[in-house]
Amino acid sequence: QREAAIKKLSRAEKLLLIQRKEREAMREMRRKERQVTAQEAWQIVERSPYGVLTMLTQDGMPYRVPLHMVRSGDALYFHCAMEGKKVDALRENPKVSAVFVDSSEIDGPKLTTRYGSAMVFGEAEEVLDAEEKKEALRLLCLRFAPEHMDELDRSLGSIPRTSIWKITAKHITGKANR
């Protein structure tokens, strides 16, 4: 029912809905005692084994995909195929969010969960500069396969067939119950 209503909206109406949702997303955190600083939130991002990227498809439906991402300053990089549903969605609407969880453990006796999580809101853009692509791949390799850095030079020949995307963070928030 909700999907049918979204499909009936015009592109302009969908964009207005997205903007309203973005404003709501930036509301103040309800559980202030669990809010962490931006620096701590970035540390959660760096400790997380992966992040889940959320974007909207052309018909306004949310689309989420888990990805290995690496941070460089206020940006996140990931690689993917040159075409597909994710790339189509990012090209249509570059506004995205990504969620990271660095830990999650049930504390049974206290009936709570111990966790650390961060959310990054920003805009995605395809990286076209060959040098920036190489640097992003180097950072990804260093983060996720440091023992194979010597293989990186050999795989750089595939750069023309590799899509690299950069998310420029506009806002980050984090929450923890340690």
Image (cartoon, rainbow, N blue to C red):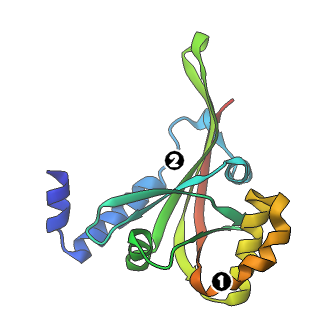
x, y (%) of residue 60?
Answer: 28, 65
In the image, what residue occupies the spot 43% across and 69% down?
86
Residue 135 lies in quadrant: bottom right
Residue contact at pointers 2 and 1, CB within 8 angstroms: no
Splitting the image into 4 quarters, where does residue 117 fall? top right
Q: In the drawing, does residue 55 fall left or right of residue 115?
A: left
Above-or-below relation of 58 to 104 = below
Mark 2 vs mark 1, CA separation in Å:
41 Å
- Residue toward you, 24 or 128: 128
Question: Where's residue 171, x and y in %?
Answer: 58, 61
SS at circle 1 = helix
Q: Earlier in the sequence, mark 2 or mark 1?
A: 2
Q: Is residue 122 left or right of residue 155?
A: left
Residue at 42 percent across and 61 percent down: it is: 22
Estimate the x, y position of residue 153 in percent, counting from the top left: 80, 78
The mark total stands at: 2
- Can residue 127 be seen here? no
Residue drawn at x 83%, y 67% is 149
Instruction: Write the residue at 69% across / 29% down.
Output: 178
Three-letter amino acid code of the residue under disc 1: Ile
Residue that numbered label 1 is attached to? 159
On residue 28, the disc is: 2
Q: Quadrant of residue 130?
A: bottom right
Q: Nearer the viewer, residue 140 or 104?
A: 140
Q: Residues within 10 Å of mark 2 (few under 14, many from 20)?
A: few
Q: Secondary structure at mark 2?
A: loop
